[in-house]
Image (cartoon, rainbow, N blue to C red):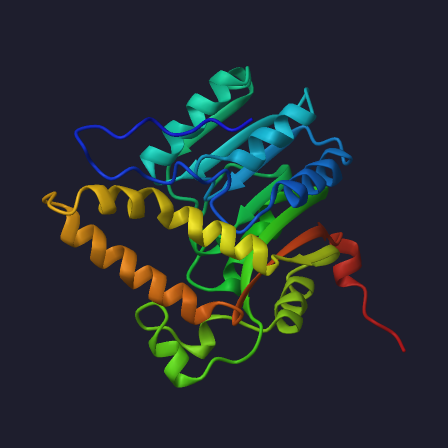
């Protein structure tokens, strides 16, 4: 059971109350991920760019001896996570820390979650993967949620996405997985968000404010809210079926294995 954020006050637009996860992740896929990660019997979980840390909380509930730390800079999301932890009796086993993850000393952890948040670890994916390898304990797991191009977007398509969108913003899936291997991981499990997960996420991301705007067209924040909603809708309907999201369950390669040359 998820814990919704605090109800909006003073007639302001509500924020993300329809989302269990801040990404295209179904209940069925999340449950399978939790089972897989819980099977490794982690004692510690680190969630990078955690938001409200829903998947971390579910993993902690599945592994009663585990303790977790979520790191993010968004105070509102962190407070939502704290309320959820309290409601589920997990508050004594989890910390939600408002801080940057760059160069963090929070690891190593048995499970490191980084779901759509590799940018929190550095300016490029190679740096982020290097940091994830540093932050995970030997024998542990990293669950990485990362964008990839399902096909190379055209210039016209890029112009309709986020500001400054470039074909170099993402790799294709094969190149992305190769980068994880080069960083010192082996991909235990590779899966990608399906169209239903994307559409549920993107719709839920907008739905609260769309309903608010429909009933508050004269509010002082209506024009700003309308522009934000219309801009985001245009972007996601442009990158729909072009931008993908993969969930990679990665196991770290031992340093001995990394040092062993490949023979043919």
At 56% from the left and 20% from the top, the residue drawn is 93
Along the line of sight, the residue nearer the viewer: 78 or 3: 3
Q: Residue at x 62, y 40 (%)?
A: 27
Residue 218 appears at what percent x and percent y?
Answer: 11, 45
Image location of residue 71, percent across then percent down? 45, 37
Q: Please determine whether, in this image, residue 15 is positioned above or below residue 224.
A: above
Residue 227 seen in render: yes
Residue extending furthest right?
264
Q: Position of residue 9 (x, y in %)?
A: 22, 28
Q: Nearer the viewer, residue 109 or 144?
A: 144
- Viewer-nearest residue: 24 or 207: 207
Quadrant of the snapshot with the C terminus: bottom right
On screen, residue 263 above or below 1: below
Q: Quadrant of residue 155?
A: bottom left
252 with respect to 205 (left or right): right
Say left or right for 194 vs 209.
Answer: right
Q: Which residue is drawn at the image coordinates 43% and 45% (left, top)?
A: 101
Query: Residue placed farthest to the front in the image?
Result: 215
Q: Is residue 209 left or right of residue 250?
A: left
Q: In which image quadrant can residue 97 be found?
A: top left
Q: Position of residue 1 (x, y in %)?
A: 56, 26
Count of labels in the image = 0
Residue 130 appears in the rendering: no
């Amino acid at each position: 059971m998820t814990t919704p954020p605090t109800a909006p006050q003073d007639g302001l637009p509500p924020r993300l109350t329809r989302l269990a996860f801040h990404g295209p992740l179904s209940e069925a896929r999340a449950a399978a991920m939790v089972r897989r990660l819980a099977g490794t019997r982690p004692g510690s979980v680190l969630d990078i760019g955690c938001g409200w840390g829903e998947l971390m909380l579910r993993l902690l509930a599945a592994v009663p001896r585990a303790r977790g730390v979520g790191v993010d800079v968004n105070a509102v999301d962190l407070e939502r996570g704290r309320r959820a932890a309290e409601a589920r009796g997990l508050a004594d086993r989890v910390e939600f820390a408002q801080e940057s993850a760059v160069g963090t000393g929070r690891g190593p952890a048995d499970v490191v979650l980084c779901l759509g948040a590799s940018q929190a670890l550095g300016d490029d994916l190679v740096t982020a993967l290097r940091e994830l390898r540093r932050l995970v304990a030997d024998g542990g797991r990293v669950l990485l949620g990362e964008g990839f191009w399902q096909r190379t977007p055209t210039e016209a398509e890029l112009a309709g996405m986020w500001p400054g969108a470039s074909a170099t913003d993402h790799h294709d899936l094969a190149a992305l997985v190769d980068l994880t291997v080069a960083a010192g991981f082996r991909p235990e499990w590779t899966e990608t968000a399906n169209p239903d997960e994307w559409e549920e996420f993107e719709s839920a991301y907008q739905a609260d404010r769309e309903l608010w705007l429909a009933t508050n067209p004269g509010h002082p924040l209506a024009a700003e809210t309308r522009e934000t909603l219309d801009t985001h809708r245009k972007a996601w309907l442009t990158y729909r079926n072009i931008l993908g999201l993969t969930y990679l369950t990665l196991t770290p390669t031992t340093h001995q294995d990394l040092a062993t040359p490949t023979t043919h």
